[in-house]
């Protein structure tokens, strides 16, 4: 069990998280957030545990009140080239390097740190335990979900507004019927199998 108290007094503590490891399509999106201790935001939690409405509300609060935040991403091509774990690390690294304030410490959700020159610790289930990581998970999720909404407008037959690219029955049926899009991840098994059959 990590002693999270040790991080409480750190100035410019950055939290980092990514979303989109599981979907078959689109970028993996990471966010890094440095919260302002003078402007606390109540209700921060793991983005997966929040309703869409609550996430959108908290996203606005974070954008308006955080000291700074940055996004990073890895494309489907990079995911196919590197594998999803390394692409997630790359997206997180990019989000951390995008900060306009140098963090004294970076806390990352999960069990490993991306390759950065700042002190870093990985916190398992950090998105539920550390406010800055919760904030990062909310920002990343809202951004990626919005991108899936945009993709839905372009390709409504796939139902991206509902499953957000995850391999649901509906998504799998649409893949079989309409075939993969250019932004599908070709190294992911369901897509790979379909492409092999074409």
Image (spheres, helix red, strand yellow):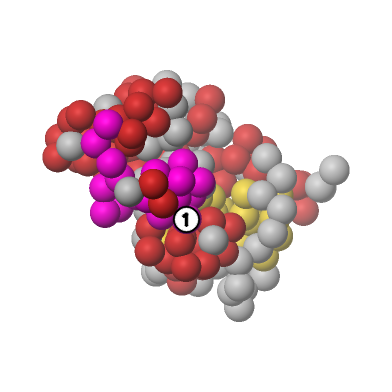
Q: In this orientation, which residue lies closer to the viewer: 106 or 169? A: 169
Q: Residues within 10 Å of mark 1 (few under 14, many from 20)?
A: some
Q: Residue at x 49, y 33 (%)?
A: 47
Q: Is 73 drawn above or below residue 65 in the view shown?
A: below
Q: Which residue appears at 50% of the width and 71% of the height? A: 102
The local secondary structure at tag 1 comes to: loop
Residue positioned 42% across, 23% down in the render? 169
Front residue of this view, candidates 102 and 9: 102
Kindly indicate the quadrant of the structure image that contains residue 85: bottom right
> Which residue position is annotated with label 1?
187
Vertical order, 151 against 27 (above or below) = above
Q: Is residue 51 left or right of residue 114?
A: left
Locate residue 139, reporting x and y percent.
40, 44
Membership of 36 in magenta stretch: no
The vertical placement of 187 against 150, above or below, is below
Q: Is residue 58 visible?
A: no
The percent position of residue 17, horizontal first and vertical second, equals: 53, 50
Report whether 100 appears left or right of 2. Answer: left
Whether residue 193 is visible: yes
- The percent position of residue 40, horizontal first and vertical second, equals 49, 39
Q: Is 87 or 54 nearer to us in this picture? A: 87
| Labels in figure, total | 1
Which stretch did the figure color magenta?
177-195
**Residue at x 69% of width, y 59% of height:** 112
Q: Position of residue 144 (x, y in %)?
A: 35, 43
Q: Magenta includes 194?
A: yes
* Farthest left residue in view: 154
The residue nearer to you, when weighing 182 against 120, is 182
Task: Left or right? Give the position of 189 relative to 5.
Answer: left
């Amino acid at each position: 069990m990590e002693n999270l108290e040790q991080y409480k007094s750190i100035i410019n503590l950055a939290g980092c998280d990514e979303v989109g490891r599981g979907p078959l399509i689109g970028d993996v999106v990471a966010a890094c957030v440095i919260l302002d201790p003078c402007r606390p935001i109540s209700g921060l939690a793991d983005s997966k545990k929040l309703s869409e409405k609550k996430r959108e509300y908290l996203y606005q609060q974070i954008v308006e009140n955080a000291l700074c935040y940055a996004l990073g991403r890895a494309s489907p091509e990079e995911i196919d080239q590197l594998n999803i774990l390394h692409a997630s690390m790359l997206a997180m690294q990019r989000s951390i390097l995008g900060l306009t304030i140098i963090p004294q410490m970076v806390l990352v959700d999960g069990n490993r740190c991306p390759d950065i020159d700042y002190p870093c610790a990985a916190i398992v289930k950090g998105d539920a335990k550390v406010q800055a990581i919760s904030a990062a998970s909310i920002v990343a999720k809202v951004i990626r979900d919005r991108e899936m909404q945009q993709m839905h407008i372009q390709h409504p037959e796939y139902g991206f507004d509902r499953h957000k690219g995850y391999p649901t029955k509906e998504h799998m049926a649409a893949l079989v019927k309409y075939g993969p899009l250019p932004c599908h991840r070709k190294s992911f098994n369901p897509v790979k199998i379909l492409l092999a059959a074409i």
